[in-house]
Image (cartoon, coloured by chain):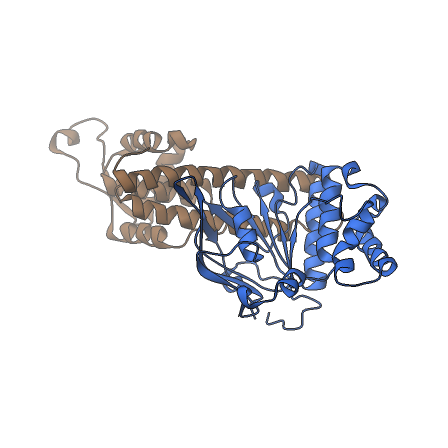
Amino acid sequence: MTLLALERVTKTYLRGRRELVALRDVSLELDAGEVVGVWGRRFSGRTTLLRVAGGLAAPDRGRVTLEGADLTDCPEGELRRRVAYCHPRFDPTHAERVVEHVAVPLLASGVRFDRACRRAHAMLERLGAGACAELRPHELDHGEATRVAIARALLPQPQVLLVDEPANGVGLLDRDPLLTMLRTIAKDEGVAVLMTAAETTALTGVDRALSLTSGELRGDTTPATAAVVPFPPRRAESSTI
Amino acid sequence: MKAGTKYAVLGLLLEQPSYGYEVLVRFRQAFDAGQWAVSPQGLYASLDRLERDGLIEPVAAPAGEARRRQPKTPYRVTAQGARELRQFLESPINADPSRAEFLVRLQCAVSKDAAALLELLDGYENACLEELARIGAEGGTDRQVIDLVERLALEDRRLGLQARLNWIEFAREQLQGVAKCGVAP
């Protein structure tokens, strides 16, 4: 069964008196455990695509569904838990140390501090950022900040992970390991990953590569027509692959 | 004979029957810009092979031509040759399309309208994107250690695909301009 689906979504923005089309009649299906990478230049609509997919921006036309149910029908808290939007920004009013920042989503849902920090530590280790746990966010380099942000997004065990340009600003030698790790997590946890890239070289290991130009999405937008069939996720409850 | 050369020659001869040297000149006119070169020997060998396979045939030379010491024999495409070319053009683009094959498709489609070319571009882009996903799968991204040389080769392929996608984007904008107002932007 399709986990996340965008059905003929159009999204426009107003810039003064001009209307800019960010997404034009875009359809996309995402299954559990697959990694879909969208290549697009700046202003191609790629960030809007992620925001709409995550329910952070409402489409003007069309709809977005999560396991068949409209995103707009999903309570805000539940939606944030099931669909994680990863952004490498750390609000200094939320926490000080990196490990606390990663624990923030758990703390917000009522988990005890020490328990939340323990799980945050484990997740940071898993993402290869264990050494960053006691640092302050401003001490992180770009690659570390990306890993930490992904750890924070993954901690509440979402079904869908949305990552805007994970490889942006990451050193060339660190890039492939980072993307491989994303793929491993997707397969192990059955998380559907939708990520964007400004360069095709940052699409290593995706199950499907798509392109977005002037708001139009091209490529195999459904898993069924994809040339590369995703591996069956190990921990998906409703795998149909 | 490479498939690309075969269909390129068929396409050129279908457009206009020509003798050997003419085909060579027209080949260069059509494909030089795409950095696709063919040697005279290679081209004549292709013509021989196509004739042997019954895909092209010599046309009776004009009256004056027959008296020359070395008469120039124009070739034309046979019905079977035309059928094969059409089948190639209508077949979906391979997952890993060679540049030569795509250039032939583009060249053969020149007489068509912008809409047909845009459709062709979509197919080419799809093929490139599928190839990108396949590189990931082949590249052993599930393995922790990738051989350095393998990594470099994969990067080269990815950057090559990036260039193709950039070109597709450029071509699409040009064609959309043509489709809208009849001239390239």
Residue B47 position (above or below residue A36): above
Instruction: Please state the horizontal and vertical placement of residue A93, each as a whole percent of the image.
Output: 76, 46
> Please, which residue is most extreme toward the right here?
A114
> Please, which residue is most extreme toward the front here?
A93
- The quadrant in which residue A76 appears is bottom right
Which chain corresponds to the colour brown? B
Of A222 and B99, which appears nearest the observer?
Answer: A222
> Please, which residue is most extreme toward the left here?
B63
Of B105 and A125, which appears nearest the observer?
Answer: A125
Q: Is B9 on the left or on the right of A103, as rendered? A: left
Instruction: Please state the horizontal and vertical placement of residue B158, each as a whole percent of the image.
Output: 58, 41
Residue at 39 percent of width and 29 percent of height: B33
The number of discs equals: 0
Residue at 47 percent of width and 56 percent of height: A59
The hue of chain A in the figure is blue
* Quarter occupied by the N terminus of chain A: bottom right
Residue at 71 percent of width and 51 percent of height: A150
Residue A178: tell me if it is visible.
yes
Q: Is B122 on the left or on the right of A241, as rendered? A: left
Of B32 and A183, which appears nearest the observer?
Answer: A183
Instruction: Please state the horizontal and vertical placement of residue A72, each as a whole percent of the image.
Output: 53, 64
Residue A58 position (above or below residue B36): below
* Quarter occupied by the C terminus of chain A: bottom right
Residue B96: tell me if it is visible.
no
Instruction: Please state the horizontal and vertical placement of residue A211, each as a whole percent of the image.
Output: 50, 48
Residue B140 position (above or below residue B22): below
- The quadrant in which residue B74 appears is top left
